[in-house]
Amino acid sequence: MHERNISLAPKGKAKESVHWQLGWWDLTHSLEGTNRPVQWTKSSVIYMAHESEPRVIGRHFPSSRQFLLPTPPFISPMDSYEPPTVLAISPTEDWMFAYFPGKGCEGWGCSWRKEAELDHWTVVDSWSYPVGGGIVTAAWICPHREWVVSDAGSSSRLPALGPPSSLGSPLLVLVTESHYLHVFTMGQEKAVQLGGRVSLLEPTDPVHPFFEPEPVGKVGGDRICTKAAIGLCYQESTILVAMRSQLRPSQHSIQTFQAAVDLGLTMDLSQPNPIDSPFVAEWEAWGEEQMISLCEVRVESRLNIPPVMSRPLPPIYHQSPLIDMAFYCPYPHHSHPSPTKPESKNSASHVRSLYLAATFFDPDDYTSLPKSEIVLYNFVASSQSSTYWALRDKSQRPSQTKVPSFLRPSPSRGGFLVGYLDAGGLLPRRKSKFKEANTGAIEVLKVPGLTAHEDWESVPIHSHVQAGTVDVPVSVAVSPNDTLICCVSSPLLGSHQSIQGLPRRVSGDTSLALTGSLPGDLSKHLVCAIRSRYSPSDVIHALAAPSLPTQVTVDTLYNAFTTMEADSFGHMQMWTAELLGVATEVYCARTQRLERGPEQDLCAARWQTTYEISSLAACCGAFDTCREGDSYDLDAVWQLLGITGWVIELVEKLFKECIFVGEGTNAGRVIPDNPDGPKGTTLDSPIFLHLVHPYALSRLRTAVDHVKRFHDQVAKLSAKGENSHIAKDFLMDITEGSGVDLQLLGPLLADILHDGKALNKQDLQRSLASCSPVPALVPHIRKVVDKVSSSKAVDRARLFIKPADLSDGITRLALSEPAGTPAHGLRDKNVDVVKKNALWRNKPASVCVRCGGRSDVALERRGGAEGPLSRWQTWEKSWQMRCVCGGMWSSAMYS
C-alpha cells in the first residue's frame, strides 16, 4: 500500500496540510490474527490482555482506574508465556477464563471467580494444553436471561441463550487448535470439572464415545484451527461451531527433514527432488485453508447418553483469507419485535435462524488497498423435527474504497456493527489541541441483506495521532447497554484506548439532531439496565456531558420513570430505589464534569439529596431487621446508636433550611440567583424533596418513628452494666442536645405527609426525576416551611447552637456550609456509608464506585460466614454486594 503522504505548502503561502493513508502495517493484526482480547462487563469494567506480560488488566469505566487480576500460580517465570489470547467472562460476571499460550512450551487455561468487590478476583483452577492444542475461542452458557425494551416501552425477558445447563451451573465451552470442543462445569464443591469433550471433525458415536488423548500433530502437516466462532440460539440445545484452519509443517516432519540433510555428503543440486518426496506436496498445501469447517454440537443431560455429541456439517468455501467471523442470533419474535420479517406466519413459529458473518481480505501484493468482502450465511433449523442446522442462503457486501476493521453483532439494532476504515484522510494541525483524526465510520448493517440500516445513523471513528501516525483500532468491545464502544490500538504504537459512541436512531427533525431522539433512546437503555441490574455508566456517560442541557437529562430520567411505572403492574415502589440510584450517579457525574458555578452546586445538591433518601431507606431496614415486636435487639445497640445520630443530624439539617427560607421570604430577602449565598435559600431547593415527595417523606417519618421507639426503650434501661449505662448516656446526649423534640416530631411529619396526598402525581414524578421540586410545588413547600418554622417540635436555640460550639468558642459557629466543603463528594470520608458509624483509619474499607462512600461490609464476605448470624449481621450481609445508593464496591479503584 502507500507511505504517509505529507504535502507542505510553500513558505509564507498557506498553512501546512498533512494527510495520512492507510498502510498494510495498519492491518497487520487483522491479517495475522494477533488482536488483543477485550471484554466490557455488565458492571462497567473493561478487561483486556496486558501488552507484553501474561496478565489481565481491568479498567473501571468511567473512573479510568486500573487493576491487575491475580497471577496464576503456573506463570513462572513470566517470560515463558505470552499475554492471554482468549478472554471470556460469564454473563453473570462471577466467572472469568483466560488462555495463556506458552513460548515454545505448553499453554495454560485459568479460571477466576469474583468476590464482593468488582475488582477482587481469586484464582480457582488452572489446567495445561499441549503445543498445537491451545484454546482458540471460548463462550459461556448459563441460565441468565436478558431484558429488552420494545419501541412502545414494554419490558420483557428473553429466553436463556444456549443449551440448558444442569443444576443451573454455568458451562464453559472451549474450542481448541486441534479441533476439539471442551465443556467445563463450574460448581461449588469442585470448582471446575470437565463435563465432556468431542471432536469437531468427526461425528460422535452415542454408544462408544471417543475419549482417547487429543492428537496434536500428524506426519505430513498439522491442521491447526486458527479462528473459530461459537453460535448460540435461544432455547436451543445445540450450538454451531465455525472454524478456519491452517496446514502447518508438523514437528515430526521438520525433525525428519533436518535429520535427512547431512552437509558432509556430496549432493547433486542439479537433480530435482524425487517425485515421491513427501515434502513437495506438503509445501504446496501449507497455509490457510479455503474453507470454513462447521460442526453442530448438542449439549444436554440425559440418561445413558453422552452429555456432548457432535456432527460435522458441510463446509463453506471461500478462497480469500479470513479476518473475522461472528454469529448473530435475532431476538425471538414473541419476546421482542425482530427487525427482519419472517417469510410467513407459519414458518416464523417453527423455523429458527442463526447468522454467521465473515470478513475476508485479499491483500494482493500489499501495494494497494486490500479488497474486502463481508459475507453473511443464514442457517435455519426446524423446531418440529430433530433435523440439523442447514445453510439456506448467503448475502455479500464487497468494499473497494473502505476496509472493515471490526464486526460485532447488535441484536438491539437488528444487525451488525461494522467499523470501516477510510483509505486516507487529513491529520490535525500540529498546534491543534485535539490529537485525533477521523479514520472511518461505524455503520449498522441489516440482517439478512447486509445493507445500511436507514433507521440508524453512522458515527465517525476517532483515532489517536502521534508523530504523524494514526492508531487505528485493532480490538473493540461494546458496552453492556449498547451505547459505547471501547477501541484499542496496536501495542506496537502504544496501545491507546478510546471510548466512542455507537450509532443512534435517526431523528426525523433536523432541528433536533443533537438531542431530538436522545431522551427516548437513552431512557430505554436506562430501563433495560435497571431491570437487568447492569451498571448504567455507559448510558450516564452521555447524560453527564457538559454540553448537554440539564433539561435533557431531566427529561431522560423522567421518561425512564414513567416507562417503568407503566410497566410495573402496580409495584413501582420496588423500582424507585433503583431509579434513585441511577439519578444519584447521573447528577454526581455531571457535578464532576461541570465547571465551578451555580449549575455545579445545583447538581451536587441534587445527588446529595437522592443519596440521603436512599440512606433513609437503608436505615429503616436496619431498624426493621433488629426489631423484636415493640423493642429492638440490644446486641446491636451501638450500631443503632450510629444510625440514630445520622437520622437526627439529617432532620436538623432539613429544619435549618426551612427556617432560613421561611425567615428570608417573610423579610423579602429571597435571592435565588445569588451564587455566593448559602445553599438552600429558595423554595425549590433539592433538600425540600424530603418534605414534598411521598417516597422520601414516608421514609423520613418511618426512620423518626424508629428513633423515638429506640430512644424510649434505651431510656428505660437500668444501669446494671457499664456497657448499657454508657449507651444510655450516649443516646441522651444525642437526643437531648438536638434541636428537635422526638415526641412532637412524628406527628409533625405525619401532618405534612397527609397534606401532600392531593399533590399532582405528574409533578411529583418529575420532581423525583430532577431530584428537586418543580415550580408547581412551590406553594405547597411554602406551607410546609411555615408549619415547620412555627412548630413546637423545633428548638431553635439548640438547633443552631450546640454545647460543643459554646465550649470550643463562639468563633467556630457557622450558619452555612464551609467554603472548603467539596461539591462532588460526601462530606466525611471517615464515616461508614452503610452503617453510619466511624471507620478506623488503618482498617481497609471498600469504596462505592457510584457515590464514593466507604464501608467495610463487603470485606466480611472474604472470610466467609461462620456460625449463625445475628440480626444486625443479617442486615449487613444484604449490603455486601452493593452500596445504599446501588453502586458496586471496589477495593482499589479510589485512594
Image (cartoon, rainbow, N blue to C red):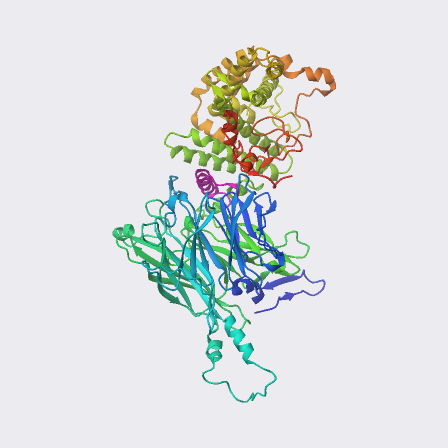
Residue 888: % across, % down? 54, 38
Front residue of 723/546: it is: 723
The residue at the point 66 percent across, 53 percent down is 432
Front residue of 792/650: it is: 650
Rendered position, 602 above or below 41: above
Q: Is residue 528 magenta?
A: yes
The reply to whether residue 586 is visible in this rendering is no
Residue 408: % across, % down? 46, 55
Q: Quadrant of residue 18?
A: bottom right
Rendered position, 701 above or below 73: above
Quarter that holds the C terminus: top right
The reply to whether residue 172 is visible in this rendering is yes
Q: Is residue 536 magenta?
A: yes
Quarter that holds the N terminus: bottom right
Residue 550: % across, % down? 54, 36
Front residue of 816/133: it is: 133
Q: Which residues are magenta?
A: 513-537
